[in-house]
Image: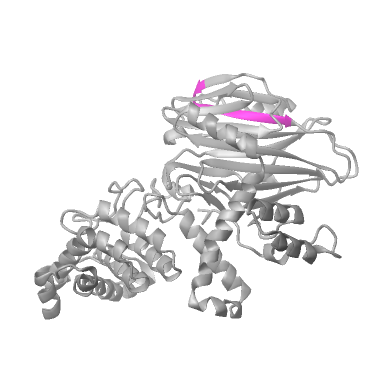
Amino acid sequence: MSGIRPLIFGNGKILICEDERGTVRDVYFPYVGLENHGNSIRVGICDLDSLYCSWLENWNIRQRYKSEFDTEFCNRIHEISESPEEEIARVMASEKGAGNKKTPETFREVTSNIGETVFENSDLGLKVTVWEAVHPSTSIFYRTFEIRNVSNSSRRLRLFSNQNYRILETKIGETAVIDKNVLIHYKRDRYFLHASEPAFDQYAVGTAEWRGLEGTWKDMESDASLSGNPVAHGSVDSTLGWTLPELKPGEATRVHFWVAIGKNYCGVLKVHRRVKNTGSYLFHHNFNFWNSFTERISVLSEYSRMPQLPEEVIKCFYRSLLASVAHMDITGSVIASCDSDIKQFGADLYTYCWPRDAAWVCLALDRARYHHLSAETFEFFSRTITHRGNFLHKYTPAGDFGSTWHPVPMIQIDETGLPLYALYNNWEIARSVWTTGRYYRALVIPAASYLIKQLTGKQACQFQVLTCGKREKAYILTVPVRSMRGSRAPVSLPAPLGIMAMQISGKRLQSG
């Protein structure tokens, strides 16, 4: 198991994950954590003189989220942000005397959701840098490849990208087709449109992973060219190629590549046209959105003391915040992990929402004042709570009951106690009558009634605390404490909300 994916890009509707070799492995749509259409999207380069081809995943690799941006990028940020002229002048003044390469202080060591992967091959004398991001609100995955010749001789090269999906998590019944300057993979109501600037000049679609046929990428490896086959169905893959301009020593060129994801042909085509008009400005929009998102931290009373913390701790805080949000679906689900490599150990995944774990995320988000996000998760809780007032083991991002390793009745009491406590904590911090009042009858009353009944009745000692290793003792203590703390919500909340208190539950709680 490789551990957490080093680069993940999401917007609540799609989630793209890359492994430690720079290969795209996970493509979730239309839920974050449900329907993984990914398998592999990998990139290669061929030398047209020697016909030698190499996959970037075999090169030396450095991966990170981009944290510094050059002057041109920063100027464009101010432009699309409609910054006042005096602000732009201030930034420009800070650059004078330092050359065109100096980066304004406001764009150094920032936390972004733009990935940067550097591939280097000293034997080939090539360096490829890939910048990539997902649009904050539209289902677009955008990548820019910069190919630089670091050798002492001119090079004639061809860049390739191989797409091998498992749409709806199986290779059966897919179609890949070339339509003018775009490539589309689809099955039923799942469409993936691929396009680029400049347009690809080589392509092939064909059978892959079926009866000994490995895929169209074999064409690339054999002679650095592709067959030009325009359509295939069944178990398929596709490869696109770009013949690059001749690169002299030290020169570089770029290819912009994007994937529009949707539920029908017209929808992805419409998104594609939007991308074609805006081009690489998608990176600027992504930067603006997430930079504005993290600025909300400045309202914290503790914000003025953050500089006292070690730099690595501050970076970890912001990166953890963005990673947590990337695992959230717009339906309110919060999955435990997006890494599909886990399925190799037991044929199941961690792309489920545990109510207990989602509640912990809500506690952190509310502490950071992201109350609107925790409210989305409370909505998810209100849809998944059972008629008995408890939560089951775990749920899919769509709200269905997930797989379980618990015996009947498939219940952990803290799965019910912590969501209730999280809502109570939200009230204590945010004092939002709108949020708390909305979920009082749908969540607080049924969950508190269930907890009080179980914690004060004959069944109080019958719960199985299913944990492992050193965490067991902590959970034995945490479960009743957090659950009882949550069960106080119906007594503490009604008065401010203008609701009559639960008399029965209140008496049981006081007598307990």
Q: Please tell me which residue is depicted at 45% across the width and 45% down the height of the picture.
A: 13
- Where residue 414 appears, x then y in whole percent? 27, 66
Count of all numbered marks drawn on residues in the image: 0
Q: Please tell me which residue is depicted at 58% across the width and 78% down the height of the picture.
A: 309
Residue lying at the far front of the rendered structure: 85
Overall secondary structure of the magenta stretch? strand
Query: Start and end of the magenta stretch?
Result: 233-242
Q: Nearer the viewer, residue 462 or 419?
A: 419
Q: Quadrant of the C terminus?
A: bottom left
- Where residue 305 appears, x then y in whole percent? 56, 80
Q: Please tell me which residue is depicted at 79% across the width and 61% down the height of the picture.
A: 102
Against 22, is 158 above or below? above
Residue lying at the far right of the rendered structure: 152
Quadrant of residue 370 within the rendered picture: bottom left
- Where residue 439 appears, x then y in whole percent? 25, 60
Give left or right: position of 30 versus 431. Answer: right
Colour scheme shown: one colour
- Where residue 262 appears, x then y in whole percent? 47, 34
Give left or right: position of 411 versus 511. Answer: right
- Is 235 within the magenta? yes
Give left or right: position of 37 versus 408. Answer: right
Is residue 214 in view? no
Against 391, is 239 above or below? above
Against 146, is 176 above or below? above
- Is 213 within the magenta? no
Q: Please tell me which residue is depicted at 60% across the width and 44% down the height of the picture.
A: 23
Is residue 410 in view? yes
